[in-house]
Image: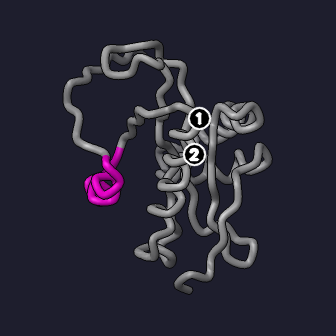
Amino acid sequence: MENSWTTREALASDAELIAVHACHRPEDEGRRAGYAEWLGPRIGSGRYLGLLATHEEVVVGGAGVVLLDWGPTRANPGGRMGRVANVFTAPAWRRQGIARSLLGRLLTHCEALGVHEFNLGTTPEARSLYRSLGFIDYAAEMRRRRG
């Protein structure tokens, strides 16, 4: 399987598939349709940039970046930020560099567009991948959620 995958851009028609990757936990199934509905127009407008890895036209991995108009900050005077999302590799295809390759290409593309700040949520298993791409732990945030 190694090096037998190709890469293509995510299309608006891929929104349902990407939603399955984003909402892969059983407790997230109820939000898949809404996520796909939200995602499709963002892919179409260029506010979500995604890449998919395929083998014989079957998607084996993916990664995306949601482009956010965050507003200028001291650390990011340009005000645009990328939120890394939907990084996924099918279990049989893991440890082959798919996620690293897709995300690396997306980050480079975003930087060429002038986006230089990125954030993401991660799992303990994926931290080393993100650290290898230059991400650092950032504990200064707080969150408030209602309802």
* Circle 2: element type: helix
Q: Quadrant of the N terminus?
A: bottom right
Residue that extends furthest to the bottom in the rendered view of this protein: 1
Label 2 environment density (alpha carbons within 10 Å; few <14, some 14–19, many ≥20): few
Quarter location, residue 96: bottom left
Q: Which residues are magenta?
A: 122-134
Residue 131 colored magenta?
yes
Question: Looking at the picture, does residue 90 appear above or below residue 136?
Answer: below
Front residue of 109/120: it is 109
Question: Looking at the picture, does residue 89 appear above or below residue 64?
Answer: below
Residue drawn at point x = 51 percent, y = 39 percent: 111
Residue tagged 2: 109
> Decide: marks 1, 2 in contact (CB < 8 A)?
yes
* Residue 145 x/y as whole percent: 36, 18
Residue drawn at point x = 31 percent, y = 49 percent: 134
Residue drawn at point x = 47 percent, y = 51 percent: 25
Q: Quadrant of the C terminus?
A: top left
Amino acid under label 2? His
Amino acid under label 1? Leu
Residue tagged 1: 113
